[in-house]
Image: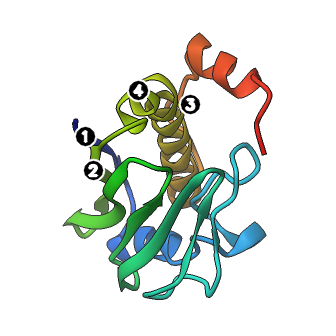
Amino acid sequence: MAVYNVHERLLTAKGSEVGALIDTISAGPADRLWPHADWPAVRLERGLTVGSSGGHGPVRYAVTAYVPGTWVRFAFTGPRGFHGFHEFAVLPVDEDRTVLRHTLAMRATGPARATWPLVYRPLHDALLEDCLDRAELACTGTLARRAHRPPYVRLLRALPRRS
């Protein structure tokens, strides 16, 4: 099963301001993009550097490309059946507006053919919208409209987690 999933937000901010946010991924409490207070934090064994591995919750990946302030790509190493990547890209529109885009492109095989659409995709979509909310707040100090968590996502988050 081919999966192509994109989340993006047009921000009233310079590309350098938005790029500074992706540079903080996995910086613990100093991470200004990832919603680590509400979701499993990104942990990378050597920080945001090419070759560093880690992930968030059960999702595992390695940094395969990184251009500071511009783009970072992570290749999936888990869960089983996730074959592909996810990335953040900073796309300046003009001097004062920038698109922050997250792209996930993968082939789901085996158990992921069921777990992606039933579990991972709804959680992924909610998490990414929370990321974009954090980016908007960090860059503008305001939030035009907070992302909404559908009832199904709230149910998934309430279920006991397996270790």
Image coordinates of residue 101 in percent, x first then y, are 32, 54
Q: Which residue is mark 2?
A: 106
Mark 1 vs 3, N-terminal side? 1
- Which residue extends farthest top? 151
Looking at the rendering, which quadrant does residue 87 occupy? bottom left
Q: Earlier in the sequence, mark 1 or mark 4?
A: 1
Is residue 157 shown to the viewer in this render?
yes
Front-most of residues 48 and 83: 83
The kind of residue tagged 1 is Val
Secondary element at image label 1:
strand
CA gap between label 2 and label 4 equals: 14 Å
Per the image, the residue denoted by label 4 is 114
Measured from the top left, where is residue 158 in percent x and y? 76, 22
Locate residue 118 relative to residue 100 in the image: left or right.
right
- Dot 3 alpha-carbon crowd within 10 angstroms: few under 14, some 14 to 19, many 20 or more: few
Q: Which residue is mark 1?
A: 3
Per the model, the C-alpha gap separating discs 2 and 3 is 28 Å
Mark 3 highlights which residue? 146
Q: Decide: marks 4, 3 in contact (CB < 8 A)?
A: no
Q: Amino acid at mark 4?
A: Ala
The label nearer to you, 4 versus 3, is 4
Q: Are marks 1 and 2 in contact (CB under 8 Å)?
A: yes
